Amino acid sequence: MGEGDRASEARLAWQVLESAERIHAAADVDRALDHMALAIRDAVGRANPIMMVVMNGALVFAGHLLPRLAFPLEVDYVHATRYHGALTGGEIAWAAGPSLPVAGRTIVLLDDILDEGVTLAALADTLQARGAAAVLKAVLVTKKRVRAQGLEADFSGLDVPDRYVFGCGMDYNGFLRNTKDIFALP
């Protein structure tokens, strides 16, 4: 895609932002992060965990959550996606795996959203197969929907409706991850 195409997509992103419905304000997100941090600390604060950031969506979430976790931990990342810049998911593509050894470790997967749960389930299965002692899932938002795999997050900040949402790390066509509020398409 050329520079002109991305400029056109950016203009469309502005239109989307202006017409979107604010689902959660930044203050809601901050309160949710505070509650999640306490729950995560209580669950794994003494376990020498690896906080595994799922890129790119969880980058913003992790950047706000990690400073709230006042205990020793390590941070790593994985990059797997089903969206490839699209609005609907397809096959999982792996761009990067963890660099830290996970065998015998407690892993907390940090992801932006629990939607269908396909990517998060695949990541958890992969980490378990590599010998992780425990794999917990922490998501900023959980979409209110039935998931075919029945996957649920161990820690979740906020619920969102079963609509396309963006902001706080979640994107609209590669844009708008950087908004402090969480929005939904009309």
Image (cartoon, rainbow, N blue to C red):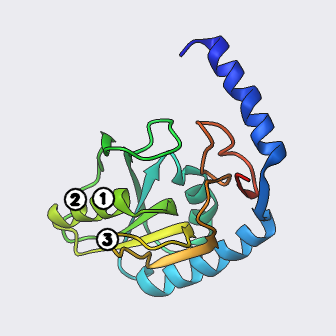
Which residue is disc 2 drawn over? 126
Q: Please report contact status of discs 2 and 1: CB closer than 8 Å, yes or no.
A: yes
Apparent side of residue 126 relative to residue 73 in the rendered image (left or right):
left
Q: Quadrant of residue 68?
A: bottom right
The amino acid sitting under disc 3 is: Gln
Which residue is disc 3 drawn over? 149
Q: Residue at x 50, y 77 (%)?
A: 155
Location of residue 36 in the rendering, given as x and y in whole percent from the top left corner: 58, 77
Q: Quadrant of residue 69?
A: bottom right
Which residue is disc 1 drawn over? 123
Callout 3 crowding tier (Cα within 10 Å): few <14, some 14–19, many ≥20: few
Is 124 placed above or below 85 here? below
Q: Nearer the viewer, residue 148 or 173?
A: 148
Residue placed furthest toward the bottom: 42
Is 40 placed above or below 130 here? below
Is 20 placed above or below 162 here? above
Residue placed furthest toward the front: 186
Location of residue 102 in the rendering, given as x and y in whole percent from the top left corner: 24, 62
Apparent side of residue 14 relative to residue 60 in the rendered image (left or right):
right
Q: Residue at x 72, y 35 (%)?
A: 13
Location of residue 171 in the rendering, given as x and y in whole percent from the top left corner: 61, 45
Callout 1 crowding tier (Cα within 10 Å): few <14, some 14–19, many ≥20: many
Q: Secondary structure at mark 2?
A: helix
Q: Residue at x 34, y 59 (%)?
A: 118
Q: Nearer the viewer, residue 24 or 136?
A: 24
Q: Nearer the viewer, residue 103 or 121?
A: 121
Callout 2 crowding tier (Cα within 10 Å): few <14, some 14–19, many ≥20: some
Q: Secondary structure at mark 3?
A: loop
Is 83 placed above or below 40 here? above
